[in-house]
Amino acid sequence: MINLFYKISTLKKYMTKTAKIIIGVVVIVLIAWLGYFYKKQATQMGNTEPIKIGSIFALTGLGASQGEQELKGVQLAVKEINEAGGISGRQIELISEDVSLDKLNVAGSVAHKLVDIDKVMAIVGTTWDEPAQAILPIIEAAKVPMVGQNQTRALKKDNPFNYFFSTWYDNEVGVRELLSYAQKMRLKKVVIVRPIGAGFYQYVSDKISSNAKEFGVEIIEDINLNNPTVNDFRTDLAKIKIKKPDAVIIVLNGFTGCPFLKQAGEIIGNVPVLSTEGSGDYYALSQCSKSMENLYFSYPKETSEYASFVERYDKAFGASPSTPSVMTAYDALKIIAKSLESTNGEGGEKLQKVLAQTKSYKGVSLNDISFDELGFVATPLDAFEMRTVKDGKFVKIR
Amino acid sequence: MEYLIHLTILFAIYGILGLSLNLVVGYTGLLSVTHAAFYGIGAYATAILLTSFGVNFFVSVLAAIIVSAVIALLIGLILSKFDDDYYALASFGFNIIIFSVFLNWQELTRGPLGIPGIGKPSFGISNFQFLISNNLEFLILALLFLGLIYFTSRFIVNSSFGRILKAIREDEKAIQIFGYNTLYYKLAIFVISAAMASVAGSLFASYITFIDPSSFWLMESIFILAIVILGGLSNLKGSLLGALFLILLPEALRFVGMPNDIAAQMRQVIYGVILILLMLYRPQGLAGEYKI
């Protein structure tokens, strides 16, 4: 062996310049021919490269408790599709990225990386409206469709984006269910409490204000806490107590809802607390189920697919899906996969067109998912129901 | 390619921020933690002028410089009453005040909703208009601004004015004995630095096309300070190196293969560890002459 290396190393000495050129040309031709042969064979055998799909959720920082769950919803969908043979025989490769409300300055870099380097066919995300706002101009220019799992209709208000779709419910339907409950219970004077005046919180608060009159509800105060991580509500609760409302409507998620409910119990006593779907959180239930017995919230109704989904999710992750956006994230990925099946794995404009025509898709979040002309899910008026907590469990209010 | 262009644009923007802050922190020795406020003023001035009044981008940059300079003059007058740690704390306070203005003056800034749909720069005369419509063209513009700021900063630090700034950093009392009014010099460099930061803000607003107050929070001031310290105090090339390093490092970590479940958290841990190691083994920064 040593002798062979010696021979090769000394061979150079005896090679003329012409011989070197000939060998160089032969090597280049050989590489080019191999490349051509490989490409031809790949075309003949069909493309078996995995289809890359990106996900952008809050995995660290603000909203991570929700974003991690949403990622699991998407992971479950990818696992099921890949186990069933993939999209036209191609497996899905999920590329996950982290953008949260407190790291908006990286949103552009993340979107460019997914689109330009990873060359994803589509994206699922983001956690809440604000990161999506920064990403939409990029995906629109790159013609890469994105399906959001918890974006409000306020997102497209300022700019129409053709490549963005959302599987999230119309929040107005949930708000109207809540106000209808307030009307039935004769809760006429209410105070709204929300952590910030933007995105989801602003949108829901606006919808409560614009629909309240129709249900005979008067908003006597709208408190914007101006802090998304707040967990000390005592000062505001003391102010609320002076106003003597019939109920308090909180636009908080389960994570911040628990401290609020505990402190509300101490300061405003039995004044009912009303809320939207964000409060129906299993993590919150495990932390403050007793305080949640005074909470009444609108929540999406369970679909025919829901029970089976929960079983599969539990098997995969050993827990229940804690927020409705786990289901909408799962549906978002499944709808993208179904559309890619129709385009035979082709993205861009073709995928956008197929996604825009999504009609009557039987999802886990809704029995009939159809995108309207703006790319949002047309939500039936009876999609929500009222729930509360009894003996440590979420129960439907009849 | 678009990704690389995007990162280079970010490098140009943060390079401008690093260079401008280095004039105050590195060369003059004033530990200012309010730079994100001037960055934000520039961004908001451009965003408001472009979206509400249809003003040309370059005119908006000029307006942003003037607004930032006037506000910096007022803030600088108050900050001149403080020294050392108290200076840092007071500058910290100003960042909070200006952030609150961005957040709560909803009629002007739209508060937390932010300002979307900010236009791209254009220039020309009458019918001959050139719109910077793609990222490569924007990159050239951003690099031109970075070059302008770099050479202006180099001119400043190499001038007699710059030598007095260094003397203030080394021993303010001694330079006062020679009859120099140090307040004038400190105020002047603070205003110049703020004006430069506002240029970065204008570029950021026009490039991202959407701004909201979260981009100009205290953490952004600390990030810019990290660029200056990591790159090297009192070294202009160091600021550029610091910006390059802090922009590219988190991006490079995105390509380190890790399971999706822990990748985001692990990247943050690795990023932190690398910064700690760098400060342990290179306390003067990547190209610094002087350490705090």
Image: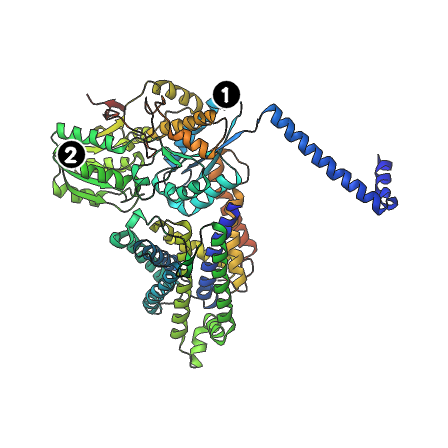
* Residue sitting at x 36%, y 29%: A328
Mark closer to the observer (2, 1): 1
Mark before the other along the chain sequence, 2 or 1: 1
- The percent coordinates of residue A174 (x first, y second) are 24, 30
Q: Is residue A128 left or right of residue A382?
A: right
Q: Which residue is mark 2?
A: A271
Q: Amino acid at mark 1?
A: Glu
Dot 1: chain letter: A
Q: Which residue is mark 1?
A: A83
Does residue B246 appear in the picture of this structure?
no
- The percent coordinates of residue B11 (x first, y second) are 49, 54
* Residue sitting at x 34%, y 29%: A371
Bin the neighbour count of mark 2 within 10 Å (Cα to Cα): few under 14, some 14-19, many 20 and up.
some
Extreme residue in the front direction:
B127
Position of the C terminus of chain A by quadrant? top left
Answer above or below: position of B216 versus B29: above
Of residues B37 and A292, the one nearer the viewer is B37
Of residues A124 and B31, the one nearer the viewer is A124
Q: Are marks 2 and 1 on the same chain?
A: yes
